[in-house]
Image (cartoon, helix red, strand yellow):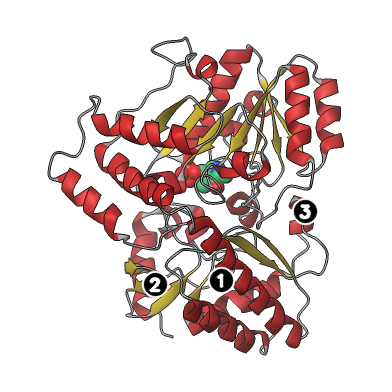
Amino acid sequence: MIYKRSSQLFAEAEKVIPGGVNSPVRAFKAVGGTPIFVKSAKGAYLYDEDGNRLIDYINSWGPMILGHAFEPVVQAVIEKAKLGTSFGMPTELETQIAALAVAMVPNIDKIRFVNSGTEACMSAVRLARGFTKRDKIIKFAGCYHGHSDSFLIQAGSGAITFGSPNSPGVTEGTAKDTLLANYNDLENVKTLIEANENEIAAIIVEPVAGNMGCIPPNKGFLEGLRTFCTENGILLIFDEVMTGFRLARGGVQELFNVDADIVCFGKVIGGGLPVGAFAAREEIMNYLAPLGPVYQAGTLSGNPLAMAAGLAMLQTLDDDRAIFQRLADKTAYLHEGIDKVLKANNVVFTINRIGSMISVHFDARPVVDLKTAGNGDNETFKKFFHGLLNEGVYIAPSAYETWFITDALSYEDLDFTIQAIDKVAKTF
Ligand SMILES: *Cc1c(COP(=O)(O)O)cnc(C)c1O
């Protein structure tokens, strides 16, 4: 396929936007070449500025679980836009989406909407600190919780891809309050808690990690975190920005039957518009302004277009209870297909999968944390990425990313993808 116009547009963009992109993961730094510029998208497909059609496995990095330009979401946004795009005053719509989210997700009484996953995680930690009157947090290497200062310490995909796990600009003062643990390593967490007795406000975790490839929790890991938190007066924050409304109707809390104290959302909850949210039991949420002392605000929070898109999305997921099984079935089918063709071509690999999240790693050893995620052979990944792009299949331009399966993907699309992988594997 030819990507001539995309290259030209990228050159223009580089003149006025740092690196030509508004979020680093969109650049092709890790794989070489220049990013594809999108013109439109519908269902399972992207259409680029050169007129190519690509099967999309990124799906805006997660939000488009029903495929692109999903009709009820598009209609809801159009109808709301005609009535005014922002008021900075309450609307009934906000209560409707809040009530639906609270009904779908276990163990939460109240939810507050913000504009991104970053904001949700940042606010959740502030709330946890205010509630517990403690300063420190534990995060896991390779987990990404957005780009706010406290989290840019071994922060997963984007940050690792660009070799700056700890960003300049984050002060030592901020960094010292973030304690780092290894994912799936309860002993490590225990040691940190013991060394910082009565100082830790929260443990924040991606309950299924998705920003170092897809890494499900080991058996007992989430349960262990829950026990540590309960025993030590620490709040457990599940960052479900990626997994919420994707792995189950009620997210990972429902899937593994483990309760978090605060849950963060983003991506799917906004139906493709800029939305994040955080939620908890009433006693914790009532700590937020204007009821409580912890300040948190937003001019565009609860924006009517964003809420309309999110509500249409959540309503569809709530009505169609078979959807999560359907997504898991498609993902399992893709897994089996990839497994078969890579083995047939003698490729060394590991595939991780849960629900509609899957990642392919070019190393035979199990991938369970950031260190093992780094074992993958990046030269093979580059060939894999560009080979697939040439066949019209678009996966994330980094070996540390998860693929997202959408309801719009047909079994024909999956077969096409498996055949494309077979073709590409022959060139390794
Ligand atoms: C994407 C993501 C975020 C950040 O969300 P933004 O909307 O990009 O700010 C936070 N946490 C997790 C787990 C994510 O996947």
In this rendering, the answer to whether 132 lies above or below 189 is above
Q: Residues within 10 Å of mark 1 (few under 14, many from 20)?
A: few
C-alpha span from label 3 to label 2? 31 Å
Between label 1 and label 2, give the one nearer the viewer.
Answer: 2
Residue 106 placement (x, y as % from top left): 55, 34
The residue under label 3 is 368
- Give me the C-alpha separation between circle 1 and circle 2: 23 Å
**Mark 3 Cα-neighbour bin, 10 Å: few <14, some 14–19, many ≥20:** many
Q: Earlier in the sequence, mark 3 or mark 2?
A: 2
Residue at 67% x, 90% y: name it: 426
Residue 236: % across, % down: 66, 28
Secondary structure under badge 1? Answer: loop
The quarter of the rendered structure image containing the N terminus is bottom left
Quarter-of-image position of residue 346: bottom right
Q: CA distance from mark 3 to mark 1?
A: 27 Å
> Can residue 404 be spotted in the picture?
no
Query: Which label's residue is closer to the chain start, 1 or 2?
Result: 1
| Residue 6 appears in the figure | yes
The residue under label 2 is: 45
Specify the quadrant of the image occupied by residue 168: top right
Residue 161's place in the image compared with 136, above or below, is below
- Tell me the element at label 3: loop
Amino acid on which the number 2 mark rests in the picture:
Tyr
Which residue is more in the foreground, 97 or 188? 97
Q: Amino acid at mark 3?
A: Val
Q: Which residue is mark 1?
A: 32
Q: Nearer the viewer, residue 333 or 262?
A: 333
Q: Secondary structure at mark 2?
A: strand
User: Type of residue at label 1?
Assistant: Gly
